[in-house]
Amino acid sequence: MPAHLKVLALVGFMLVVVATPREWFAAYAFFLGVLVTVGAVGRVRPGWVLKRMVVETPFVVFAVLMPFIAHGPRIEVLGLSLSESGLLSAWGLLAKGTLGVIAGLMLAATTTPQELVHGLERLRLPQQLVQIMAFMVRYLEVVTDEMRRMAVARASRGFVARNPLHWPVLARSVGALFIRSFERGERVHLAMVSRGYTGRMPR
Amino acid sequence: MHVPDGFLDAPTSIATGAVAVVAVGVALRGARRELDDKTAPLAGLVAAFVFATQMLNFPVGAGTSGHLMGGALAAVLVGPWTGVLCVSVVLIVQSLLFADGGITALGTNILLMAVTTVVVGWVVSRVLLKVLPKRVGLVAPAAAIGAFVSVPAAALVFTALYAVGGTADISLTTLATAMLGWHTLIGLGEGVITFLAVGAILSVRPDLVYAARGVITERDLVIKPKESVA
């Protein structure tokens, strides 16, 4: 399936999910069913998805706190006094957020970054934006690798970041990483100009 | 700290999406003025840098750690337009390839983390540099204050959005106090790290710091006779 259709499907699906009232519990079971079917068809491993769902953690914490801080009529659950509307909100946040993360991961699992960039280009995203994204995706591995090498270099000198006193060291690494990235950008640009680049990618 | 799907209702998400599209469009035109035909490779590499920086954890103590948001840092280093563009691209890629931040909340996230932090960080540091005496040593503190202000500013915009299209039933004052209090702390960290990082870059390549243009003066190469060195 072409990447641009997948992106459109994802946006459409999530808009429907977000617009669905949270009291329609059956609808959410249906949405989850759709995602499970997509995952099965796309042969996405459940373990891969579960491992990447940690990005949701801060908002799970927020959702769990919701029944305690929301106002409105209270009910007793397991000896705790919880806000009824808070419980409902928490459910809504968790359900929609989780569906969003799973749906996003379905796209990520079945699409390579290159396909995605081409897909966005077909969706008529501005040329410049697509080019920037293409460069970012292409050099992401290089830049994160550079950062990893610096981390290895720090560690091999016995550095362990434990408290804010160690921030200057890490911040200098950030500075060095910026200079290296920027200079790499300049080199890449010069290399492209010498091959005839005038600000547009050849079709 | 990306906003997930379903946190704000659909109309608000679509509205912030429209605002984000306009903002990115304006930034695209502005960035071409800052970088001309270098835009794509340079902004791409800077976006990769912002992404990588967000992976670097700064220990806060007691086993917890945080990371830089980098909006104000990007603004000070490469200029506001390119900054908005780079952070927006980072957010798009994070949303589509890492499911970090909901796809329907992408506009909200761009508005909060790309537009608000970059613009506030830039304006604050710019005004400070205009008011303060023109010295290179003051660029990093100005950037730090910009970064510090930018984080609670984004939290404030979030609270405002929440007042319009929030889906959970919490009192706004509770949310506003909690968000502001918490993000003032985060902003402190952001400010300190931005200060240190900008300072480090200024001491090595001051010419690469966009905000320092006009502050660093041309220095002529002077060849000193040997006696004066010793």
Image (cartoon, coloured by chain):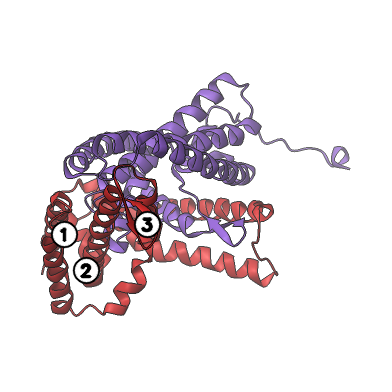
Image vertical order of residue B33 relative to residue A96, above or below: above
Of pointers 2 and 1, the one earlier in the residue sequence = 1
Q: Secondary structure at mark 2?
A: helix
> Where in the figure is residue A90, as x and y percent of width and height?
30, 54
For residue A101, what is the image quadrant?
A: bottom left
Disc 1 from disc 3: Cα separation: 27 Å
Mark 2 = which residue?
A106
Q: Mark 1 or mark 3: which comes first in sequence? A: 1
Q: Which mark is residue A64?
A: 3
Question: From the viewer's perspective, is A46 left or right of B174?
Answer: left
- Identified at 53% across, 59% down, the residue is B57
Discs 2 and 1 share one subunit: yes
> Mark 1: which secondary structure?
helix
In-front residue for pair A187/B110: B110
Tell me, yes or no, whether the two marked residues, 2 and 1, touch with CB atoms within 8 Å: yes
Please say if B162 is above or below B97: above
Give the chain of mark 1.
Answer: A
Q: Quadrant of the N terminus of chain A?
A: bottom left
| Mark found first going from the N terminus, 3 or 2 | 3
Distance from label 2 to label 1 (Cα)?
9 Å
Tell me what residue is drawn at x 58 percent, y 46 percent. B193
Type of amino acid under label 3: Val
Q: Nearer the viewer, mark 1 or mark 3?
A: 3
In the rendered image, residues at marks 3 and 2 fall on the same chain? yes
Pinpoint residue B5: horizontal percent, then vertical percent: 25, 53
Category of crowding for the residue at label 1, using alpha-carbon neighbours closer than 10 angstroms: few (below 14), some (14–19), many (at least 20): many
Chain for colour purple = B
Q: Quadrant of residue B221?
A: top right
Q: Are marks 1 and 3 in contact (CB under 8 Å)?
A: no
